[in-house]
Image (cartoon, coloured by chain):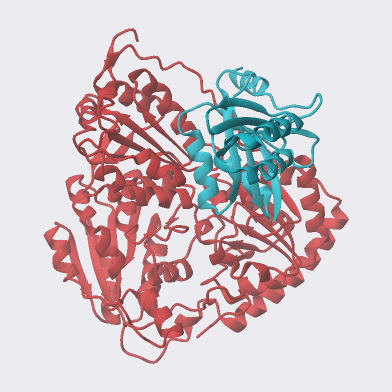
Chain colours: A red, B cyan
């Protein structure tokens, strides 16, 4: 360890020491020394060359969200790093552990508007958990360690490290032993015992309890503990978009997704509940609808690792700051009187039966079941076939983009296992699916990874398909729900703006030919009777396949809560 | 809308003021006054932030999300010493000179510069006293004025030292 290394070599070694083995990026002038060095470390540090830094960032997000490990993306100074801004903002909104490594112009010209100089630490300050400008080679090893620590502890999030070219080129004897010194950063992971007791006693007094789980349950890998807790108290479970799969949807206690495009029975249950415990969700407006009308009868317990989330959108009775898994374990340690639990079980059973009646009345996957008598292909036909194929074959992970198809996927596919549903939630980033699926496919070569996108979002980042070929990735498939519109905007225009389809009709290239140009297998599906065969073929081919599903153009996602309305007021058709 | 005074200890790093101010801006919180400076502990800076907010608890929590923020105290209801300084340059003609000198004595202010037609007065005090002084002096003709903003320290044994926080983290 006493030998001199370049800053770039130190960067490689520090990344490897802190658990990084895969990175997604694009080289350029300022980051070149890093690329020069990483060649020596390529057996331990795989680099995947993307075609746009946004793609690299989303790929790193997909890698991170599907593994729980840090995702790493790289861009050079100037436009290379500004292209990373969208995935960084996306990771910020969805608390994804992301490390963005950016090249910066040399410290000698920094601040002088040098070629490809951009103040990326300034730009990303509001959308990172923390960021650094490193100008001294002696800081590199420590900053990498601290950055990954911050990104992967407490509430996860993106951290950006901007390193000047001269720091990467300089030589020094590295010191990897410096201990992390963060006097202002001590996340609370263990919930207060007193609050946990209060939460449980409040729960046991209730007759209409709901357990709502969010992203925090996924991020802290608390699925198993949540299941034990739910089963012990027989409490119905609602899973938000980012928690889909954290509680199996075929479980007798599962109610599915709430919110703007959640199920009527899930939303009604929230509105009628007298107790709601939210573990690891942040009461996003897409979940709560008009916040002042949310769960009006419920005493609310909110478990979140970030104290600033508690009381931000919804006032709560019992706040618990802590890690979702550790708090759930603490909840399980409590041993309330068995008579109380028996009484609670009895009431919860009546309550669950009531919710199931609501569900039967409003139908679970209602729009599919009330299928209009038409010969054209509905998105629902595609999702039904995909569900069947995925359930038959198992080992699937699905990455969705943003829009109508995203909500249909959330509603209509079956979610049984954690980290199998990956999407852009908080930021709603169109263009997420293809590159993020690439990251998931790299991380999980044993699984079939489906990117499901609309024809709009697909065209924002489809260039990353060629990376799949270059990297010889076999396990990725793309399904385009192609309706010739920016569909979700069109739906709002239809429902609230008198069908003025301003800026939403969309002409697309022939996606099958596009896929073929990229070296993929392309399939076009134009009618219901072609769906199953196409999916069969996609599975049969040992390599990337794209299916262009040309569905009925004007189909809406229902149920739906209009913006700023109570989740009690759903449009169902 | 209540006025709150926050004492915020932060690590003395480049950009930390920017991070704090940026958070106020993007979340729509209104800063009435902000002063930052060195403290008794090396590596720790201290801010006194006066904020107009309906929900100061959220302001505090959001500030705590910044990695370099060590400790935040809302001292709005504590007994405190509040001080700010003002420098005032007055246009002074001979006939008012004596009156101004008398007023500066009343306010325990200091005349720090005298020229042919001007005078610079330095005055330190609580915000209300500074307001009062400016009101009284204004009729004489203020040419320039600069207030520093408020710095605050809690009276008595209770305090806000960064030393302990730094020591704990170093262990």
Residue farthest bottom in this picture:
A373
Side of B168 relative to A429 (left or right):
right
Compared with A6, A65 (above or below) is below
Compared with B68, A94 (above or below) is below
Q: Nearer the viewer, residue B5 or A56?
A: B5
Residue farthest front in this picture:
B95
Q: Tell me which corner region of the image, top left, top right, bottom left or bottom right, holds residue A283.
A: bottom right
- Residue sitting at x 19%, y 68%: A511
Residue farthest left in this picture:
A517
Q: Tell me which corner region of the image, top left, top right, bottom left or bottom right, holds residue A33.
A: top left
Side of A262 relative to A355 (left or right):
left
Compared with A531, B118 (above or below) is above
Q: Tell me which corner region of the image, top left, top right, bottom left or bottom right, holds residue A136.
A: top left
Compared with A545, A221 (above or below) is above
- Residue sitting at x 39%, y 56%: A397
Q: Position of residue B159 (x, y in %)?
A: 74, 26
Q: Position of residue A289 (x, y in %)?
A: 58, 70
Q: Nearer the viewer, residue A525 or A569?
A: A569
Q: Nearer the viewer, residue A25 or B162?
A: B162
Q: Position of residue A458 (x, y in %)?
A: 28, 64
**Quadrant into which the N terminus of chain A falls:** top left
Q: Position of residue A425 (x, y in %)?
A: 46, 59
- Residue sitting at x 65%, y 24%: B162
């Amino acid at each position: 360890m006493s030998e001199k290394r370049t800053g770039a070599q130190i960067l490689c070694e520090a990344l490897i020491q802190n658990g990084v083995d895969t990175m997604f990026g694009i080289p350029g002038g300022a980051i070149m020394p890093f690329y020069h060095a990483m060649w020596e470390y390529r057996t331990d540090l795989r680099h995947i060359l993307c075609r746009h830094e946004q793609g690299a960032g989303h790929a790193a997000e997909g890698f991170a969200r599907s593994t729980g490990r840090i995702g790493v993306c790289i861009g050079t100074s100037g436009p290379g790093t500004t292209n990373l801004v969208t995935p960084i903002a996306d990771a910020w909104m969805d608390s994804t552990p992301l490390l963005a490594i950016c090249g910066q112009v040399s410290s000698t010209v920094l601040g002088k508007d040098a070629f490809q100089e951009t103040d990326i630490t300034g730009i990303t300050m509001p959308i990172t958990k923390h960021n650094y400008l490193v100008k001294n080679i002696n800081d590199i090893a420590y900053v990498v360690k601290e950055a990954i620590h911050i990104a992967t502890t407490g509430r996860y999030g993106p951290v950006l490290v901007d390193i000047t070219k001269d720091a990467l080129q300089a030589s020094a004897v590295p010191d990897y032993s410096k201990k992390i010194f963060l006097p202002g950063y001590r996340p609370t992971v263990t919930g207060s015992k007193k609050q946990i007791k209060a939460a449980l006693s409040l729960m046991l007094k209730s007759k209409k309890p709901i357990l709502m789980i969010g992203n925090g349950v996924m991020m802290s890998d608390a699925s198993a503990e949540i299941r034990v807790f739910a089963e012990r108290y027989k409490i119905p479970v609602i899973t938000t978009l980012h928690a889909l799969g954290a509680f199996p949807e075929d479980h007798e206690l599962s109610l599915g997704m709430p919110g703007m495009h959640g199920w009527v029975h899930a939303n009604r249950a929230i509105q009628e509940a007298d107790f709601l415990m939210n573990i690891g969700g942040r009461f996003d407006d897409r979940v709560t609808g008009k916040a002042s009308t949310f769960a009006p009868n419920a005493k609310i317990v909110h478990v979140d690792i970030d104290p600033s989330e508690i009381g931000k959108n919804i006032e709560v009775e019992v706040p618990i700051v802590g890690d979702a898994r550790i708090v759930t374990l603490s909840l399980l340690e409590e041993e309330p009187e068995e008579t109380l639990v028996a009484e609670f079980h009895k009431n919860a059973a009546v309550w669950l039966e009531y919710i199931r009646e609501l569900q039967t009345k409003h139908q679970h996957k209602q729009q599919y079941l009330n299928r209009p008598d038409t010969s054209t292909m509905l998105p629902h036909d595609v999702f039904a076939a995909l569900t069947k194929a995925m359930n038959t074959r198992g080992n699937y992970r699905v990455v969705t983009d943003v829009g109508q198809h995203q909500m249909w996927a959330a509603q209509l596919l079956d979610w049984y296992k954690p980290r199998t549903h990956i999407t852009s939630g908080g930021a709603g980033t169109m263009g997420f699916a293809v590159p993020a699926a690439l990251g998931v496919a790299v991380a999980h070569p044993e699984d079939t990874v489906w990117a499901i996108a609309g024809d709009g979002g697909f065209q924002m980042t489809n260039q990353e398909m060629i990376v799949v070929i270059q990297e010889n990735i076999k396990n990725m498939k793309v399904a385009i729900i192609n309706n010739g519109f920016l569909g979700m905007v069109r739906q709002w225009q239809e429902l609230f703006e008198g069908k003025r389809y301003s800026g939403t009709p969309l002409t697309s290239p022939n996606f099958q030919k596009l896929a073929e140009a990229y070296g993929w297998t392309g399939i076009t599906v134009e009618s219901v009777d072609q769906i199953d065969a196409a999916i069969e073929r996609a599975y049969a081919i040992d390599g990337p396949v794209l299916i262009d599903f040309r569905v009925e153009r004007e189909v809406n996602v229902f149920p739906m809560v209009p913006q700023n309305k109570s989740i009690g007021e759903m449009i169902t058709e | 809308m209540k006025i709150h005074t926050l004492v915020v200890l932060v690590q003395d790093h480049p950009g930390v003021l920017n991070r704090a101010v940026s958070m106020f801006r993007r979340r729509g919180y209104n800063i009435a006054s902000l002063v930052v400076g060195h403290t008794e502990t090396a590596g720790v800076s201290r801010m006194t932030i006066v904020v107009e907010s309906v929900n100061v608890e959220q302001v505090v929590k959001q500030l705590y999300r910044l990695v370099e923020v060590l400790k935040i105290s809302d001292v709005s209801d504590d007994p405190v010493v509040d001080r700010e300084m003002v420098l005032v340059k007055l246009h002074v003609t001979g006939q008012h000179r004596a009156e101004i000198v008398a007023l500066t004595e009343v306010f325990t202010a200091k005349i720090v510069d005298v020229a042919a037609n001007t005078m610079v007065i330095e005055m330190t005090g609580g915000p209300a006293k500074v307001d009062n002084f400016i009101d009284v002096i204004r009729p004489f003709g203020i040419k320039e004025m600069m207030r520093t903003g408020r710095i605050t320290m809690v009276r008595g044994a209770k305090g806000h030292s960064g030393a302990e926080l730094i020591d704990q983290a170093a262990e």
